Amino acid sequence: MRWLAKLIYLRILGWKIIGNTSFSKETIKKAVIISAPHTSNYDFFIGLFLRKIVGVKTNFVGKKELFTWPFGYYFRAVGGVALDRTSGQNKVEAIAGFFKDKDEFRLTLAPEGTRKKVSEWKTGFYYIAQKANVPIIMFTLDFENKQNNISEPYYLTNDFEKDMAYLKGFFKGIKGKIPENS
């Protein structure tokens, strides 16, 4: 299947991968991966191609209702983990717990939390990485230049303002599939 992903991603769609193309898979078994700008459903498929090509298993969380028949098997097969989103639950704690329970877990999240234009990122990814004591790896969804730029792992300094400025700086000027939502 890797050859098919390469054919579609590289040849047909014309995308390229730059930066940390191994995701540091030899040493980084656990990380929070943030991808931005998240403006379209196409982002999910670009991410699937990317992870297949670089050969790194990644995960995502979704509401538990997504993991029922007929799609549950597919979502689990591509790295999905069901999350109970009933009120009163600490989602950061619950998601950080996934890291504790698994030998290898690279959680991919969109810091915007939606495909619409936002003025501020959600901060849950930061606190999940902090609580789980894992680095953050960033990758761009740059539809303008048809490329994914993957960062080296970034270890939080616990200076929220400094860390967020660094993380947001990586995505500066990147345009998603729907540029007005970037």
Image (tube, rainbow, N blue to C red):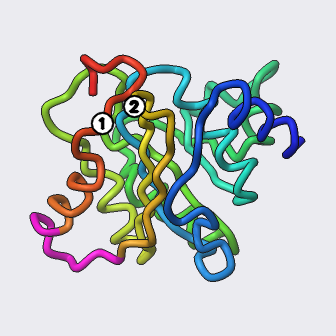
Amino acid beneath label 2: His
Residue linked to disc 1:
112
Left or right position of 57 against 7: left
The quarter of the picture where the C terminus appears is: top left
Among the 4 quarters of the image, the one containing residue 49: top right
Classify mark 2: helix, strand or loop: loop
Secondary structure category for the residue under label 1: loop
In which quadrant is the N terminus drawn? Answer: top right
Q: Residue 8, percent across and down?
A: 75, 29
Q: Look at discs 2 and 1 and give the one toward the viewer.
A: 2
| Along the viewing direction, whichever of 111 and 39 lies nearer the viewer | 39
Q: At which x and y percent is residue 100?
A: 58, 73
What amino acid does circle 1 point to? Glu
Query: Circle 2 sits on which residue?
Result: 38
Q: Is residue 140 above or below residue 113?
A: below
Q: Measuring 43% from the left and 63% from the top, which residue is drawn there?
A: 151
At horizontal 75% and vertical 48% (from top left) the residue drawn is 52
Q: Residue at x 23, y 79 (%)?
A: 157
Residues rendered magenta in the picture:
155-162
Tell whether label 1 touches label 2 (CB within 8 Å): yes
Q: Nearer the viewer, residue 151 or 113?
A: 151
Separation of residues labelled 2 and 1 (CA atoms): 7 Å
* Total numbered badges shown on the rendered structure: 2
